[in-house]
Image (tube, grey):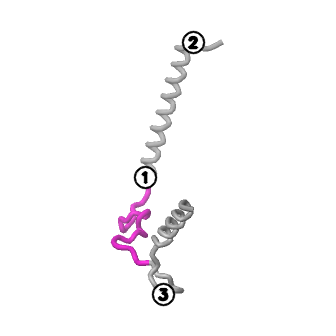
Amino acid sequence: MKARPSIEKRRKERARQDKKREKSERRSDRKVEKADRPAREDGADPDIDHIVPGPQPIEVDTSLDRYVDPLAEVNSDESGQDEKAEA
């Protein structure tokens, strides 16, 4: 037998309230953890410390001692597909 709609609504509302309370607790815990964490001396973000702004260095093939165009492989692959499509 199926439960009455009002009982199901109460269960859903109770589940929503529980989830909201748990989420609030997680947020407050995170806030406390964040406040307890010591600040970095240099103030830099560790996620982007390794990124160098500006133009990136040109890739050189050390075995050939010449510039290697990274798009050359892509362009040659596309031309090869065109030839296969025509055949």
Return the x and y of residue 67 as percentages of the image width and height: 44, 81
Q: Amino acid at mark 2?
A: Arg
In the rendered structure, which segment of residues is drawn in magenta?
Answer: 37-58
Looking at the rendering, in which quadrant would you find the N terminus?
A: top right
Q: Amino acid at mark 3?
A: Asp
Which residue is identified by label 3?
A: 65
Which residue is identified by label 1?
A: 34
Which residue is identified by label 2?
A: 4
Q: Residue reaching furthest left?
A: 54
Could you say which is closer to the camera, residue 69 or residue 56?
69
Few, some or many residues within 10 Å of mark 3 (<14, 14–19, 20+): few
Return the x and y of residue 56 as percentages of the image width and height: 39, 74
- Residue 22 lies, with reference to residue 71, above or below; the image says above
- 29 part of magenta stretch: no
Q: CA distance from mark 2 to mark 1?
A: 45 Å
Q: Quadrant of residue 7?
A: top right
Q: Residue reaching furthest right?
A: 1
- Give the total number of marks visible in the rendering: 3
- Give the mark, 2 or 3, whose residue is nearer the N terminus: 2
Could you say which is closer to the camera, residue 32 or residue 64?
64
Few, some or many residues within 10 Å of mark 1 (<14, 14–19, 20+): few
Check contact, mark 2 vs mark 3: CB within 8 A.
Answer: no
